Image: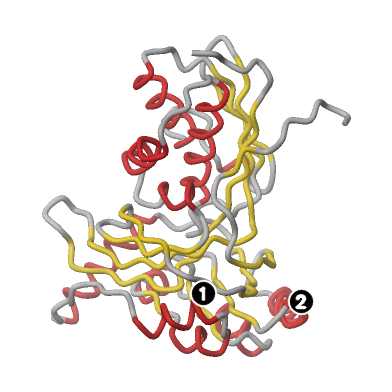
Amino acid sequence: MSAHQAPVTVRVPAKVNVQLAVGAARPDGFHDLANVFLAVSLYDEVTAAPAEALSITCAGPDADQVPLDRTNLAARAAELLAARAGIEPAVHLHIAKNIPVAGGMAGGSADGAAALLACDALWGLNTPRAELLDICAELGSDVPFSLVGGAALGTGRGELLTPVGAGAFHWVFAVADGGLSTPAVFREFDRLAAAAGTEIPEPEASPALLAALASGDPDALAAALANDLQPAALSLRPSLAATLDAGVEGGALAALVSGSGPTTAFLVADEEAAAKVAAALEASGTCRATRVASSPAPGATVLPFSPAGV
């Protein structure tokens, strides 16, 4: 094994679920999903540098909410990779945070995928892609997509990926105050389903949505967006309804809760519309901040090394 002594930085995208179909709870507590992931141009960067022992630092919006212990998926990624290689996870991981924290955009999962790729490069392991994806799936359901990026259908609990076609789309994201726990949102989904007494169908990807995604037609995609977790997220955080309304009133083609929330996603026609919708959302007072992004975006990518100051 040859190790690079220079730090390695990996850039990794956020995601939005353009369709999230959720099945009934499985015996293991997970839910089968049909999860159409789309990577968007909001990025975290994770830098891996040689160190005496595993440590993590974080900077950026809401960095104070990011755990700096071994519950962080970036730390777990380094530990799992090192264990497979039979080495110590002697690395310092620095997370430059830009993806909303606990916001339904897979920020923690993205950091796990980025740390995995950065450590693999730093330690000169050249781990096969399939093995990296196995480690990602062990880390969490959304982590494999963070490595792959682009657009994909996730089945099982979301970790089994099939690439799908995607044209270019423009988005605005509204960041809420505070996070929402993904397990809590799934528990509320189960509670609402039990209260309604309805049988939950097997989750399936919508052919209309996949066709709209591939076409690059924002109006067609707007008509097909769907998130089965949205009623649960709104039940736990009713104020999100006002944010969704404000974005649509501001000119968005469609609005939905991103994943388990509480970030809300607004599909818009173009960059000009994105600026108008972002301004309307900020003026509405229904969110803490907005982010404008495009899709699809590449998955976790090692950035070229440049010495400080160059």
Disc assigned to residue 240: 1
In the figure, 155 relative to 203: above or below? above
Dot 1: what SS? helix
The kind of residue on which mark 2 rests is Ala
* Residue identified by numbered label 2: 275
Q: Secondary structure at mark 2?
A: helix
Residue at left offset 52%, top offset 71%: 166
Q: Quadrant of the rendered structure where residue 92 is? A: top right
Q: Tell me residue 178's x, y (percent).
A: 54, 57
Quarter of the image where one finds residue 177: bottom right
At 49% across and 77% down in the image, what residue appears? 214
**Point 36% across, 60% down: residue:** 162
- Which amino acid type is shown beneath numbered disc 1? Leu
Colour scheme: secondary structure
| Residue 290 can be seen, yes or no | no
Q: Is residue 176 depicted above or below 246 in this figure?
A: above
Residue closest to the eye, 171 or 62: 171
Q: Earlier in the sequence, mark 1 or mark 2?
A: 1
Q: How dense is the environment of label 2, judged by Cα within 10 Å: few (below 14), some, or many (20 and up)?
A: some
Give the quadrant of the C terminus: top right
Q: Nearer the viewer, residue 295 or 125?
A: 125
Marking on residue 263: none
